[in-house]
Amino acid sequence: MSDPTLDKLPGGFKGMSEDIGSDQTTFKGVNWGKAMMWIFLLSDTFVFSCFLVAYMKVRASVTEPWPYPSEVFGLEVFGVPVPLLLIAIMTFVLITSSGTMALAVKYGYEKNRKMCGLFVLLTAIGGLTFVGMQAFEWSKLIFHDGVRPWGNPFGAEQFGAFFFMITGFHGTHVSIGVIFLFIFARKVYRGDFDTGRRGYFTTMKSDYVAIEILGLYWHFVDLVWVFIFAFFYLW
Amino acid sequence: MTDTKKKEETSTHKIGIYLWIWGLLFVLSFFSYMVDWYNFQGLLRWSLILFFMFLKAGLIMAFFMHLFWERYALVNVLLWPMTAIACFVGLMVAEGKYTVFSRLFYFFVGG
């Protein structure tokens, strides 16, 4: 956030070279936890990129036709087949939860305990809904359609392996996020960030910046879904 | 005490900007879903998919993750490594073409 002391520093690339050459903290005005979360997210970006690039390479080089996602992930509503219905709803649920998280971060800055807690809780519920729908999607593909990592009735055998790996890894991220969102909703409501109560793994005082760090993680999960939605479901 | 006082002075962004970005993300997701709904194919399909994808990703990173308001030291550290991924994608496109060529050649022409 815009810290008044930072406004005196030069911005842009000049500011960047001065920050790096200052022989002090490089990321000025950035909480160390936030910087570490960014570094973690950067490494996580590479992990997800490797999965998606591997998927691209395999999909480009199979000789059998790739299963058509529009039909594989379609649902029948009152006998009418709707392509990608569940996936579209999941996308909107995740974007909604990302929006509520952004508001939670905003209220966190303002030290508005009740609103911040409410929006963290709403985000957690949104994430839980997403994981629930993903469980439904997986069970439909596994038990109803017979998709396996080594084969499926729709086309190229590699489809299942990539589907379970990529969406599974993303779903794991969402699940971990949901657990932390519930924990932090409790911490916010209890007033940990107002009283500066110490956490269980650290002797440092709690601060609302934790909500921003959690928000970064949650937005990243949404960001990854944007890429999975484009490359795996729409392509 | 001075520390908390300084934090209270920290300005926050108006709620409007978040709601706008939120709404835009909804609209863009709807558009990318429409790409599938109207069953666009070929160049139009993947250029539209990529366009909406990068726009959504950019909005999330810039405003929801606050990169737009961060100093360049952090922004550049985060964004430049992405060019390595772009190189990797380029390499794997070439590799994929070679693999599919070899497969077709040996499956149908024989070794």
Image (cartoon, rainbow, N blue to C red):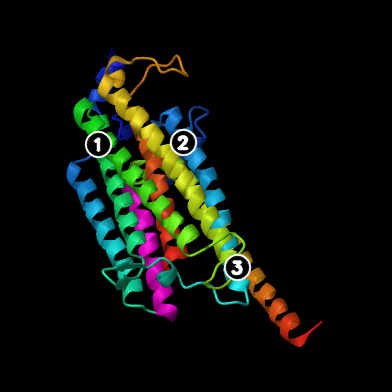
Residue drawn at x 34%, y 14% is A197
Q: Residues within 10 Å of mark 1 (few under 14, many from 20)?
A: many
- Residue under numbered circle 2: A37
Dot 2: element: helix
When the figure is inspected, residue A204 is found, relative to residue A211, above or below; the finding is above
* Left or right of A46 in this view: A28: left
Quarter of the picture holding the N terminus of chain A: top left
Q: Chain of mark 1?
A: A
Q: Estimate the x, y position of residue A176 in percent, counting from the top left.
A: 44, 38
* Left or right of B106 in this view: B59: left
Q: Earlier in the sequence, mark 2 or mark 3?
A: 2
Q: Residues within 10 Å of mark 3 (few under 14, many from 20)?
A: many
Q: Earlier in the sequence, mark 1 or mark 2?
A: 2
Q: Estimate the x, y position of residue B13 in percent, counting from the top left.
A: 22, 39
Q: Which residues are magenta?
A: B41-66
- Residue under numbered circle 1: A119
Residue B54 among those drawn in magenta: yes
Q: Estimate the x, y position of residue B85 in percent, counting from the top left.
A: 56, 57
Q: Estimate the x, y position of residue B8 in percent, counting from the top left.
A: 23, 24
Q: Is residue B17 visible?
A: yes
